[in-house]
Amino acid sequence: DTAVSQTPKYLVTQMGNDKSIKCEQNLGHDTMYWYKQDSKKFLKIMFSYNNKELIINETVPNRFSPKSPDKAHLNLHINSLELGDSAVYFCASSQGGLSGNTIYFGEGSWLTVV
Amino acid sequence: GNSVTQMEGPVTLSEEAFLTINCTYTATGYPSLFWYVQYPGEGLQLLLKATKADDKGSNKGFEATYRKETTSFHLEKGSVQVSDSAVYFCALRGAVSGGGADGLTFGKGTHLIIQP
C-alpha cells in the first residue's frame, strides 16, 4: 500500500487551463503539505494543513487553492495556469506536534504547462 | 528565519570512494535535522534523521551527526556504490510558537554521481 499517493503523476496542459492534483494518505496523520520543486530541484513548502485547517500558507499566487475535505486528503487546485507553474508538486504528510516526526512524501506530480 | 546550506555539486566520485556532503543550518531553538534522497524520476525518501544534539542518524551505510556547536549535519558514507547516485537534500524542521511543528526547510540539494 502506498502511504502517500497523488494523482496524476504526469500532467501536460495548456496555459490558461485549470487543473487539480489529488492527494491521499493512509498513515493516519493529522498534517498534510504541498511542496513545489522547481527545475533546479529546489524544494519549497506551499501549504500545510492540520486537521483540515490551514496552518502554513507561504507566498503563493492565489491561483493556487488547497482543499482538504478530510484529514486524509489534501487536493491542490490551480487556476489560469502559467508557464512558470511548470514544476514537480509533492504532497506529504506527518503526525504533527513534534519536529522530530518524519514527513512522508508522495511520488510527485510532474506538471508541464505549454 | 530557518535556512539550510549544502554543497550543490554535482559531486562525482568513483565507486568505493568516501563520501562527505556538507550541510550547515541556521535556526532558532532546537530543530530536528533530516537527510532525504531523491533517485532519478522518483519522489523523496527519508534517508536518516537526528532530533537532538550529538544524535547520530544512520541508514544504508550513510551517517550524519547533529553538531549543535558547529550547526552542522554532514552526510558521510565510507564506500559509495553506483546505486547511490541521486540528489541528496539536507533539511530541518523546527517548532512553531503555540505548539506544533513547522514544515521542512530544505537545502538546495546535492547531485551525487558515482562512476563505476
Image (cartoon, coloured by chain):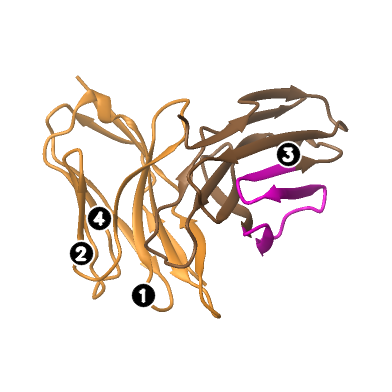
Chain colours: A brown, B orange
Residue named by callout 3:
A84
Circle 2 marks a residue in which chain? Answer: B
Disc 2 element: loop
Check contact, mark 1 vs mark 4: CB within 8 A. Answer: no
Measure how far apart labels 4 and 3 are at the Cα level. Answer: 33 Å
Closest to the observer: A36 or B110?
A: A36
Q: Name the residue rendered at 73%, 48% in the picture.
A: A69
Q: Residues within 10 Å of mark 1 (few under 14, many from 20)?
A: some
Q: Main secondary structure of the magenta part?
A: strand
Q: Quadrant of residue B112?
A: top left
Q: Quadrant of residue A113?
A: top right
Label of residue B40 in the image: none
Residue named by callout 4:
B74
Disc 1 element: loop
Residue named by callout 2:
B55
Residue B88 placement (x, y as % from top left): 36, 42
Label of residue B30 in the image: 1
Measure how far apart labels 1 and 2 are at the Cα level. Answer: 13 Å
